[in-house]
Image (tube, helix red, strand yellow):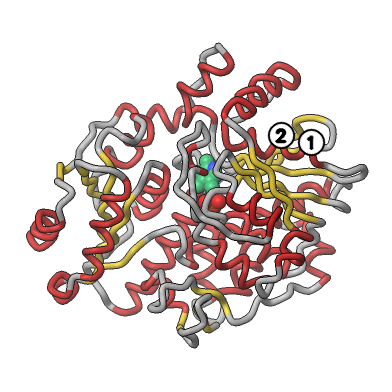
Amino acid sequence: MKYYSTNKKVSGVSLQDAVVKGLAEDKGLFMPDVIKALPQSFFDNIENMTFQEMSYVVADAFFGEDVEAEALKKIVYDTLSFDVPLVHVTDNIYSLELYHGPTLAFKDVGGRFMSRLLGYFIQKQGEKDVKVLVATSGDTGSAVANGFLGVEGIHVYVLYPKGLVSPIQECQFTTLGQNITSIEVEGTFDDCQALVKSAFMDAELNAKMKLTSANSINVARFLPQAFYYFYAYAQLKKLGKADQMVVCVPSGNFGNITAGLFGKRMGLPVKRFIAANNRNDIFLQYIRTGEYSPRPSVATIANAMDVGDPSNFARVLDLYGASHSDIAAEIAAVSYTDEQISDTLRSCKAETSYLLDPHGACGYQALKEGLHVGEVGVFLETAHPAKFLETVENIIGEKVEIPAKLQEFMKGTKQSTPMTKDFASFKGYLMGV
Ligand SMILES: *Cc1c(COP(=O)(O)O)cnc(C)c1O
């Protein structure tokens, strides 16, 4: 499969190059030349397949030409070694819990898949010492670090803003050791990102070492997110409720929902999508007006969706040939304030005893308000509520149980390297490792 850039100045790129580069040279996002439709027989039988089996079929459609079958199968099976249950919440509303992986959020799927695919290519090339640089505002660092933990030939450097990630998020990447190094930057997330970008552009550094990125726009991180849409459908079908499936996705950079749109292009019977946003409602404004007007993000209690210029919007436009009416016909949009998110979380807990996290709360509320007669809604529960412990406990006025996996991280010893935000010191550090 070849990949082209959404900016259309780059095409014919191999999967390997697309994965190693992350972003195209014209600054666009990579898209596969073809999105293969899966045969009807696959959908007829999907409810009898395991999550891993059906995901391998999906992965094969994208990556099968470029990765040997056995290796791809191992990558898929290895990535999906945790459950993604569909839980009935109320009426026609189901929660697809994507938070049973190592760091309790859906980014585990993309993080793990990408790490293994990159590991595969690096081994094939005979590279021995590849450095992955990743800047994080909290969640990405943990998913990428845990995905790459123990992967041979790769060392990961996680750059994060000192004092600006929650203690729970911090311990998920600073306690790992092995091939993971955490760098605590005296600055903001933007400073961390600037350091990473400068490193990629620095000729001297790149001559000395092999650097690559692990950001969320990488095709290897983004496409595997299609897997669980198929699994949601299969589980609903088993219940005899899949005829008018509506999927609601709490969205920030729009990578997750775009993977669902790819699933639909492959033939997955999703009637329509809803993108649920917090107050950062750039997509809602686009749906309403046809104008895409990015603006600086505002901080909310659903902070993983605090995005003012969603990077995958370029992929959405590309998929629909930039037709606003086609996009609006398939994707509805909503936006909720912190107060509405809190009210939803509290009332859902009181009425159904189901505990949402602030992101999932946006998804749940959108279905409560937006489902039409006969439709069945699935919202993606993107993170475990304990990842936002203080916020959730304050809202419901009760203690939240912390899963054992999270407690393990909290027991570990924090190890991090302090760094100023000026590039010379970061470069000096990298030259010395
Ligand atoms: C990253 C994230 C999102 C947003 O996903 P996108 O793919 O960026 O749209 C939503 N919820 C949680 C918990 C996240 O970590």
Instruction: Note whether residue 184 is visible.
Output: no
Give the image location of residue 271, x and y in percent. Answer: 82, 56
Image point (49%, 63%), residue name: 75
* Of 361 and 277, the residue lying toward us: 277
- Amino acid carrying label 1: it is Glu
**Mark 1: C-beta under 8 Å from nearest atom of ligand 1:** no
Disc 1 crowd rating (10 Å Cα; few below 14, some 14-19, many 20+) is: few
Horizontal side, residue 208 vs residue 123: left or right:
left
Quadrant, the C terminus: bottom left
Image point (50%, 77%), residue name: 7
Q: Secondary structure at mark 2?
A: helix
Quadrant, the N terminus: bottom right
**Residue 177 drawn above or below residue 90:** below
User: Please, which residue is most extreme toward the top here?
Assistant: 397
Numbered badge on residue 365 = 2
Image point (69%, 43%), residue name: 334
Give the image location of residue 103, x and y in percent. Answer: 45, 40
Q: Secondary structure at mark 1?
A: helix
**Mark 2: C-beta under 8 Å from nearest atom of ligand 1:** no
Numbered badge on residue 245 = none
Give the image location of residue 382, x and y in percent. Answer: 57, 42
- Amino acid carrying label 2: it is Gln
- Disc 1 to disc 2, C-alpha distance: 6 Å
Location of mark 1 (residue) = 369
Residues marked 1 and 2 touching at CB (< 8 Å): yes
* Of 115 and 416, the residue lying toward us: 416
